[in-house]
Image (spheres, coloured by chain):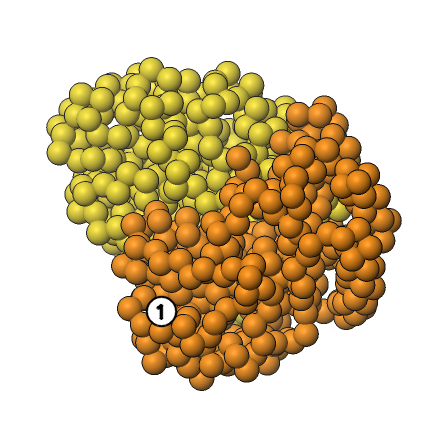
Chain colours: A yellow, B orange
Amino acid sequence: MECHGGNIYKLSRQRGISEYDVIDFSSSINPLGTPESVIDEINRFSKHLYNYPDPEAMQLTETLAEHLSINPDSIICGNGSTELIYLIVRAFKPKTTLIQAPTFSEYERACSLLNSSIRYFPLTEQNGFLLNIDVYINWMKGSEISFICNPNNPTGRLIRRDDMLRIADGARWAKCYLIVDEAFMDFCADETLVRDVINNPYLIVLRSMTKFYALAGIRLGYAIFPLNVINKIKEYKEPWTVNTLAQRAGISAINDRTYIEESLKIMVQEKEFLESEFIRLAIDYIPSEANYYLLRLKKAMEVIQFLKEKGIMVRDCSNFRGLDNTYIRISVKTNELNTLLIKELSNIIK
Amino acid sequence: MECHGGNIYKLSRQRGISEYDVIDFSSSINPLGTPESVIDEINRFSKHLYNYPDPEAMQLTETLAEHLSINPDSIICGNGSTELIYLIVRAFKPKTTLIQAPTFSEYERACSLLNSSIRYFPLTEQNGFLLNIDVYINWMKGSEISFICNPNNPTGRLIRRDDMLRIADGARWAKCYLIVDEAFMDFCADETLVRDVINNPYLIVLRSMTKFYALAGIRLGYAIFPLNVINKIKEYKEPWTVNTLAQRAGISAINDRTYIEESLKIMVQEKEFLESEFIRLAIDYIPSEANYYLLRLKKAMEVIQFLKEKGIMVRDCSNFRGLDNTYIRISVKTNELNTLLIKELSNIIK
């Protein structure tokens, strides 16, 4: 079984088509595609691969710091935020970890490799996959680290900043490092905690440039650490993980205001469109503040197979801890592709 | 102190110049620069960063396997061979490790992070930094893993294939995994062990595409594993570490026969030139089969400082375990730059 969405290569090999002809609703990437400004920057710097990348990614770090109004000394860039998840776990070597279920699977994998004892905090459909904050804070007591993906993957549910700050205070009280993965935060209103890390020695924020800026192929993420822990993390950091083109891509992407505005606009439009279609077709969906929807379908496995035969990939969610084989996740794409998906969905569901 | 050569960013910031104006003799990269064919391929694929990279790097792996006449199932690609060094150590968790001194420092760092007890096998200038094979085999008994960089960094000394096979047999006898890092092997005669891995369950070969193909900025390496250990290694592999452009660059690079032939030709010419100049200037150098030389200079630290003021970086080797502050390493570059270096060296040495 696939662990993640987005493996267009496997399906294209199976079907004997070009990987770029697969219609990929399984990974949740900005449908506008990689910004033109980023592609131009990469093409300008592709002649500079002779040299090692800047191991400190100084220019990118300073650009991020300015953009986010935070201290550059609190930032570490990574080969995607995935590198940083594994790095944090290796540095902390937590004996006990608290993770929600369902959520992104790499937290569990990183902790399991270090034999951390993992406690799963259940999020249920009956409760709309929402977190009971007081109970969660109690569970953090006795855990050394805790991961919260916000908005959560695959549900799209968001915990607002005020509530997250309450959880972060709880983490401090429980002496449990709280890692908030904001991989999809750019898509919803600015509820980020990046500027709150400075006030809480137990709060770490992870960010990805993969999804919003459509940079999945070049690998770029970063994390913001309290100054009391960043040196310990750096002790474990492997050198040169962030390639030169990723560093340039990152600098270029966050300066592209037009792309950012257009992305937010298309997202509002297409989410309205999809939600109205879900309602029309009586498809159960979880209200999402991210760029994807978790759908509950009686015959999810049949739907996945039917769509695959049309060259359309959606995310089979049956391998998410806490979900079963009645869930799929689809990303929000362009109107043309969303319309196509809805058409095929209505064909199979009828 | 810098841990590695090639940090053009730090010097350029100190001197207020563009990083690409630094003349970098400190990292050992092919002076022909990144192949044009690779730059073209990257520019063609820069519009395909929307998708995640193929997590299995299948097309690259198959191209490598064909090029090397080995089984594709024995290959894992990495974000530079550095990722693979750390990955191997994490998978094996060796209680005891055998490492030469001097050698590339990341083996030691990777093992230290896991609290492995490290035994250092001394290579001395009196013995021309050559390895005593019988003694080394004895030392492997009692070690769980052992790293040999061949040709060695920073000395450039090569252990010929016949001798390496004897060491690999010794590793099997000692039940000690032998990791042969062939990062610079493309530069010298084909003494590689890549096709011998299949015959020895204790032999692992690491390869880098950084140096010969001048791909330092995009990060690409690979390793060949015996089939009895590769699944254990894959258990620990982090997903998507090899970006899409690195995968394309690798495929394109190994198919560029013209570049490969020209690189070998310029290397022969320029090594002859440099060696004759070292002799003329009475500079002590270690005979090298790689694209760099370890030089012994009485006032090495002064020389480094003098060259730095001219915008020329060389590798200060004083932080190599087993060397002192009388050693520098320089890479072989184009005739124009080698001539410039020799001119400046003769100015300061006189």
Residue B182's x, y, as percent? 56, 66
Residue A189: image quadrant is: top left
Q: Is residue B264 left or right of residue A126?
A: right
Which is nearer the eye, A34 or A119? A119
Residue A113's x, y, as percent? 28, 53
Residue B8: image quadrant is: top right
Residue type pointed to by label 1: Trp
Which is nearer the eye, A190 or B196? B196
User: In the rendered image, is residue A211 in sight?
Assistant: no
Which is nearer the eye, B195 or B11? B11
Q: Is residue B81 left or right of residue A43?
A: left
Q: Is residue B138 left or right of residue B72?
A: left
Image height of B242 relative to B127, above or below = above
- Determine which residue is flagged by label 1: B139
Q: Report the chain holding disc 1.
A: B
Q: Is residue A111 left or right of residue B270?
A: left
- Residue for point 69% across, 59% down: B291
Which is nearer the eye, A342 or B105? B105
The kind of secondary structure element at disc 1 is helix
Which quadrant holds the C terminus of chain B?
A: top right
Image height of A300 relative to A270, above or below = below
Residue A36's x, y, as percent? 70, 37
Image height of B175 relative to A253, above or below = below
Image height of B117 relative to A78, above or below = below
- Residue for point 50% across, 69% down: B131
User: In the rendered image, is residue A82 in sight?
Assistant: yes
- Residue for point 17% across, 35% down: A143
